[in-house]
Image (cartoon, rainbow, N blue to C red):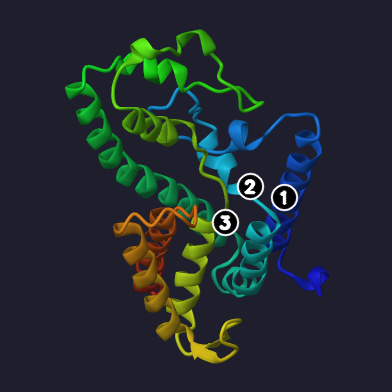
Amino acid sequence: MFASTPPITRNLVILNALFFLAKLLVASQGIYLDYVLGSFFPASPNFHLYQILTHMFMHGDWMHILFNMIALWSFGSAIEQTLGQKKYLTLYFVCGIGAYILFNVWNYFQVQEVLQRLHEQGADIARIYRNAAIDMHGRAANPQEWGPEVGGNPQDVMQLLSYLQTPMVGASGAIYGLLVAFAMMYPNARIMLLFPPIPIKAKILMPILIFVELYLGMNNYQGDNIAHFAHLGGAVIAFFMIRHWTKNRFRIDR
């Protein structure tokens, strides 16, 4: 069955699996690839430009990668066969990058609120940023920077550190882009839900999922450790890309 999967989708699944396997192998040596290949807030000392792409191949745990790869295989195969390899690959990566951008635009305003409070408290913000640097082992890269003289409300300091030290991982933004693309291209296709196990049309399911992500994101629902605005970013990008391609489907180049 997997051998009959279109090549781009098949190779993306294989790449994600290899990255996850590598993560597990090096973790036994105390090296955590999430801190190397996951993507950080752009102003974080842990951010590197390559992370905008590499974070799409990292996953938190078995359930994370399992659900993403099932969705990639299920929806990506049909989309690749319809769009062709070039457009499909473009859609996938642009949605993943769009997910990173929207997620961090939202984070920017959250970080600014915390910085404003810390500034009013007279905290040494530059020192907090330096202390936020971590190495591949998840340890502070500049432990000498920490101390009570940093100042500021400890809760605000920890909140800022959380934004600067927590990597974003996963292909979920790109996957949400594929889900939206599938719903736009095959609106009447029936998708079987897991919970509850009932079929529902794609054009009905996708708006529900988007609304849920928007609600959870706007209410700062962080207990589930999910980047809801990343999902929305991938969905929004896919909507405009598929709309553009569909609109120009019959345009003749001159």
Residue 215 appearing in the image: yes
Looking at the rendered structure, the kind of residue marked 1 is Leu
Q: Position of residue 30 (x, y in %)?
A: 75, 29
Q: Residues within 10 Å of mark 1 (few under 14, many from 20)?
A: some
For the residue pair 88 and 238, the one nearer the viewer reads as: 238
Q: Which numbered dot is residue 57?
A: 2
Mark 1 and mark 2 residues within 8 Å of each other at the beta carbon: yes
Residue to which mark 3 is pinned: 89
Picture quadrant where residue 160 is located: top left
Looking at the rendered structure, the kind of residue marked 2 is Phe
Q: Position of residue 74 (x, y in %)?
A: 64, 74
Q: CA distance from mark 2 to mark 3?
A: 14 Å
Q: Taking 101 as reference, is 47 left or right? A: right
Q: Which numbered dot is residue 15?
A: 1
Q: Residues within 10 Å of mark 2 (few under 14, many from 20)?
A: many
Looking at the rendered structure, the kind of residue marked 3 is Leu
Q: CA distance from mark 1 to mark 2?
A: 7 Å
For the residue pair 114 and 121, the one nearer the viewer reads as: 121
Q: Position of residue 78 (x, y in %)?
A: 61, 75
